[in-house]
Image (cartoon, rainbow, N blue to C red):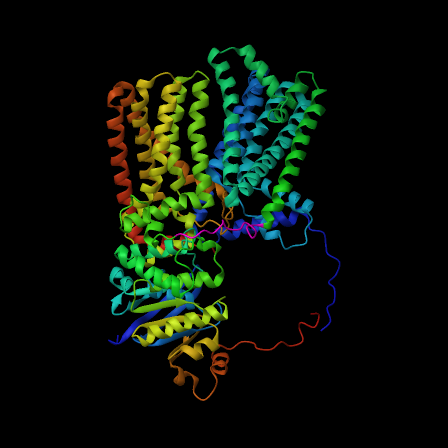
Amino acid sequence: MSDTAAMALRGLVKHFDTRLAVSGVSLDVPAGSFFGLLGPNGAGKTTTLSMAVGLLRPDHGDAFLLGYDVWRSPAEAKALVGVLPDGVRMFDRLSGPELLAYHGLLRGMPAETVDQRSRDLLDVLELGSGNRTLVVDYSAGMKKKIGLACALLHAPRLLVLDEPFEAVDPVSAALIRDILQRYVSGGGTVVFSSHVLEVVERLCSHVAIMSDGVLRMTGTLDEVRGDRTLSDVFVQVVGGRVATGSELAWL
Amino acid sequence: MALTPTAAPVAVGVRTFVRLKLRITANSLRGRTTRIVMFVLGAVAACFLAVLGHALFALPGLLDRPVMAGVLFPFGGAVLMLGWVFLPLLFFGVDSTLDPAQFALLPLRRRTLIIGMGTAALVGLPALATLAATLGMVTSVAHLGGLGAALAGLAGVVSGLLLSVVMSRAVISAFATALRSRRARDLATILLAVVAASIGPLELTLLGVLNRADWDSVEAIAAVTGWTPFGAPYTMGLDVAAGRAWAVPLKLLIVLSAVGLLVWWWSRTLEQAMAGTAGAGGRAVTSDSRRPVDQLLFRWSPRSRFGALTAREIRYWWRETRRRAALVTLGMAGVFLPLSTAFAGGGGQATGLAFIVGAIAPIGLANQFGYEGSAYATNLATGVPGRLEVHSRAAAHALFTVPLLLLVAVVTGLVADRPEAVAAQLGTLLATYGVGLALVLPISVRAAYALPDTSGPFSLSSGGGFSKALPGLGALFGALLGGVPMLIVAWTWPWFGLPAGLAYGACAYLLGAHLAGRMLDRRMPELLAAVTPR
């Protein structure tokens, strides 16, 4: 494992029942990079990231976050990482401010710091520090924003975000992009998964492409892209059908 | 491309629904050993109960005792039917293998849907077990009155099963719809109270009569019950055997009109259930100028992880529909069960029933991690230690439950006119509650299962509702057994009941919480996977 890796995965394997979801993924995410994990639906991105941050126990393999083994010293590893899991419900019967306070206190932060940072985040993300609406009644974009706020609250050195731009309107997406870029230029590392190529191409310094549970390509954006567009590379690497034949004539 | 209309739609039959239910049940078992084991255990338990019930109902015929049958059948049948309505509310949750909301987009007539869902509800362990048990009545009347009586009995038993299923579905659907909207909770609370209170008078008369052992009036009440929808299906065969064949069409009419009314009611609420929660809307948004930490925590909460966890749990017990339903039902059962018996003049029984409340109370925690589903990932990602997790959840639950137990103890003591027994009663209640928690907490870690991602308060995930409730029921009986020593202590030395019960319950709780915490530390990711709906 190199010293500069913010996240290092070694031979992660996961079966669900009889299906092999992730088969032997090894990956190094350099510290200070903006890392995009690309792949079609069902490629194993969420499974991989869940194993990397300690939400899902791998069948084989190891995961290191900032040098700490997630499965052997979870407390140290988790303290330095902020996570936005996709498709995972938050404690959505709390209001936004309540949810942030909950996260902050669970992280062992002093109440004053929690209050200060929560208000900052709620104001910047335009969620309102006095807003009593329950998170369950938030729109999809607001849910992503409050999730991101929870992940940022303890000022982690590594952010792991699963599909942060899914179902987010363009204005919120721009805001999230700005926050993440600022975070990386301040020395943080972002790892995020997506299947929206434009976002990845615009933001990332490093890219990895997954399909069928296997890591197909990894490197800096320019290494992966070469002289083609990312979209061409993606389709070629992943394979699959991009045009219909004569089957849907009845449509 | 031109849009060509598809061929004329084929009518959807009942078989489609039944096959769909069987397929979903089978798929939910595939490749999951624990679930298969639970399912088999559930099937064995259902078989056992069915055989027991069959034997019980067949006994009067085999002994040639028509009078015994005349009392047993209407009462036994009515108890079964009430069980169909109340057991899902209290313990099991409704098997929502076929959730009406899933059919909302399909072009189905309401009629088709009702018939299909009703038939699918008949295909299941509880319905089969009930049928097998009540067929014992047919055996009885065949011995008493020959073939004609047996046929009438069979018709009665089958219509009785139909009525039970429809009643259960209708009542639960109505409650679910009522409790789903956050605004309607007050109305729902009142409704539940009315229903729970209506058991009171029934029990009162029954117990009052039984206490005096006045068999004439028991028979009279049985005869009257035989003319209500609860008893009518189960007395038809007896009527033929006793030469009152004219009663059969009348009773059949009673049962079928009851079924018709319930189906109508059910179809009304079903439509609302299909519309789902889309329009449920939030509450009026007001601004809160307090600091975020003060918004989450209560004034008296410690500013710590424990404080945050408990405060969140307390808010969840009230804000989450499934938990609120559990809490409201517990409150009703807790107050009305002992109260109604105490009024019936059975101070002793009231004490006994109150004792059961202490054991029922922890059941709400049997699948506590399932309530919030994948949101548990938050606690996992922030690294909450197992014991802290378990203690904070138990503390929040106790905050609601211990005052209830105190109320139960005071009410039963006063109504039974034994105020001096209140302290000892509270002691036994705390003892059973502690033992119950000790059993339920490890169960909640080991046997957690995902609840469907709806806000329907009584819904269980697909299939095997009965088998999923088994560990909780086991804990209930365990808590009752575990509380017996304290019951004896409280009877023998009433003054010593409270401290002994408190100490006993606390010790049991600490042991159970320690065990559950250790288990949780080892299996947090597995627990998250188990409660994540797929």
Q: Main secondary structure of the magenta part?
A: loop
Residue B255 image position (x, y, % from top left): 66, 29
Q: Which residue is the extreme one toward the bottom?
A: A227
Residue B428 image position (x, y, % from top left): 31, 27
* Horizontal relation, residue B333 to residue A102: left or right: right
Residue at image point 27% right, 18% down: B492
Residue B138 image position (x, y, % from top left): 61, 26
Residue B534 image position (x, y, % from top left): 47, 56
Q: Which residues are magenta?
A: B276-288
Above or below residue A190? Residue B195 is above
Report the front residue among B314 and A17.
B314
Residue at image point 62% right, 18% down: B144
Above or below residue B170? Residue B82 is above
Q: Is residue A111 visible?
A: yes
Q: Is residue A214 visible?
A: no
Above or below residue B511? Residue A20 is below
Report the front residue among A203 and B452.
A203
Report the front residue among B420 and B117.
B420
The magenta stretch spans residue A139:
no
Report the front residue among A194 and A209.
A194
| Image quadrant in which you'd find residue A76 | bottom left
> Quadrant where the N terminus of chain B lies?
bottom right
Q: How many marks?
A: 0
